[in-house]
Structure formats: structure tokens, C-alpha cells
Amino acid sequence: MKFDLNKSFKIMKRVLLTLLFFTGALLVQGQTIGKMELKESGFGEKKLAKAPKRIYISEFSVNYQLAYSQTSIARGGREIGGGYRGDAKASLSVAIPGVDPAELQKITDQVYQEYLGELKAQGYEIVNPDDAGNTDIFSDWEKLEGGTISQAQFPGYLATTPTGFGYFVRKITKKGRAKNGIFEYANKLSRQLDGAIIAKVNLAIPFVEQAEGQGSRALRKTFGGVAKVVVKPNFRLSPMESVQISKTGSASAITKSSYIYFESLKNQGQVNYDLKKAVKIDGVFEEKKYKAVESADSDIWGTDAGHLRVFHFSDKEVSRTQAIPCEPDKYLNGVKEVVNRFVKESLSGFLTAGK
């Protein structure tokens, strides 16, 4: 048997590339991207596969966190054992310098165009937003055009939608947040679009997380008098992030892809793709903690003033603003890779669902 060196080399090369892909991590220009595992859920997958090959993309957004703020307050008052203390307040704001928002918009645009291209290559007709706007459900909704970055949707995040992408929202709040309400609209919309599949694609990419140790939190809770905020970089594609949008309210930035079909109770189906766990993007930020700490002022003994004892104390506050340096090129390479992978892998799951 004749030994073909070139053929053997090509086979070995394919094997090595396959092994690299399935090791669970991907190396991109000197940085490591963690393993991406998707969790599929839904029902009626076989019906979904037989649905009309028409699709309306009602949501497509990528949310990039570039800033984060947190405040800790230790309330004062009378202390156990005597004396009084004032309030303590610590605020910490961190941000990433050097990342161009226009480059993030380019990533969103590029991924979206590739997404459309693959759907069309598989024979899907993309429903025009104007046609969707003629349905009853969107009759009183507001139409928006993608390509404009929003800083109001999730404070600290740049919310991007693709340039040229038309979509509808129930209303825009006074602060500029787009809201669709708490009621699911996709089934009704699919039915009004003659069974067109409704697609929703959303991604959340935070860069920090809270990092105060359990022991420190326990001590502060037990003894009080200390306000403390501690964060550290944790750059990742996240399944879900709770974002404070007001003094008392929060909203969820999620990574999720959904495909919903509804013509009737007999002919309906849905498939969803969520992350099983966060996908880490390493090699972008230094492993370092950032802190803001303030201790309360107290007066244990007080001062005699005739028939009264007077206690002297004041409220104390510290506020820190800190830039967290990173290499912008590595940041952009990292987010481009995880956005591409999630969109492509979830789309691949949808295209093979029920087959």
C-alpha cells in the first residue's frame, strides 16, 4: 500500500482542529473563550419543523456593559450597649476606557447580517416590519429603527440593535427605556402573520461582578457601621443579569434565543436556547479588586449637659470613580467571538429542531 504523506497530514490536521473545538475552550488571538453550552427547551418541535418558512425577527439586541455603579449604606442610630452612630455611605463607579461604541455597533450589525444570510440560505422568507406593523397587535405600538445605541435601556450598558432593523415596542418611558410589558405577544403575532415564526435574539455581556467575601458581609451584617462595595472584572456572556434601573426597580438583561410558531392550538411549537452557564472571556482585564469603604462615626459615651446627655456624631460618605483598563482590541475580539457563537449555535439548533 502506498503511503500518501500529504493525505495523512490533512487527516491529522482535521482531527486536531476537531479536538481543539471540542475541548470546551477556544483561543482567539491570545485570549481564551470559555466553553459554550446551550440548554434547549420548548414543545411541538415537529410542528415547528413543518411551519411556513417565513420568519419575523421581533427582537435582536446585544447589550454591552461598559460601566457599573453601586452604593452601600450602613444606617446609624442607637447602638447595642449604648451610644449612637451616624450613617455611613460608600459609592463605587467603574468604567472601561478606550472601547469605541461604534465598533460594538459594527459587531451587532455584522452578526445580524450573517444571521439573515443563513436564514435566507435555508429558504426562509424574512417578514418585512411594515407587514408586521399592519397587524392588530402592533396597531398601537411604536416602531423604532435599529442602529441607534441606547444608554437608557440598562444603565451602564450600551444596548445595540442592528442598523436597518425595524422593530416595535409598547412604549418608551420618560427615561428612554423601551418596554414591551409583561404579557407575551409572540403567539398572537404569529397567528396574525399566518403562522410566520417569531424570532427573538438577545445577548448580555457584563464585565464586572460583586466580589465582597462572605466573611466580610457577615461581619458587616452582624456589627454594622461599615458601608462597603467591592467589585472585580468578570468578563462574560451571561445567562441573565439583574440591572438596577431605579431606586426600587430592576430589569433583567438576558442571553436567550427563541423561535415561536402558532397557527392554532393544533399547529404550534416553540424552541428556546439559553446558556447553561456564563461563557468567560479571559485575557482582557487584570485580576484585581476595586473597593470603596466608609466607617460610621460614633459617640459611645456622650457628654453631660445638665439633665441631658448629648451625643455628637455625623454622617460619613465616600465616593470613588475608577477606570478599569483593558486592551480594546482584545475586548472587541472577545465579544465578537461569543456573540457570533451564540447566534450561530442557537440558529443551528432551530434549523434542525424536530428533524
Image: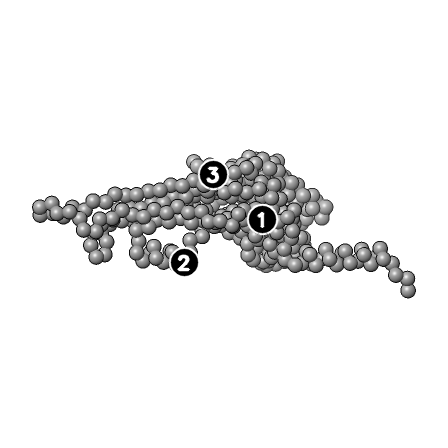
Residue 219 at x, y percent in the picture: 34, 57
Label 1 amino acid? Gly
Check disc 3 and report its element: helix, strand or loop. loop
Say above or below: 284 vs 140. below
Disc 1 from disc 3: Cα separation: 29 Å
Which residue is labeled 3 in the image? 152
Can you see residue 279?
A: yes
Residue at image position (12%, 47%) is 304
Residue 268 at x, y percent in the picture: 60, 55
Can you see residue 129?
A: no
* Residue that protrudes farthest toward the left in the picture: 306
Check disc 2 and report its element: helix, strand or loop. helix
Tag in front: 3 or 2: 2
Which badge, 1 or 3, is on the more N-terminal residue?
3
Residue 283's disc is: 1
Horizontal side, residue 119 vs residue 171: left or right: right
Closer-to-camera residue (342/265): 342
Residue 214's disc is: 2
Residue 84's disc is: none
Horizontal side, residue 106 vs residue 68: left or right: right
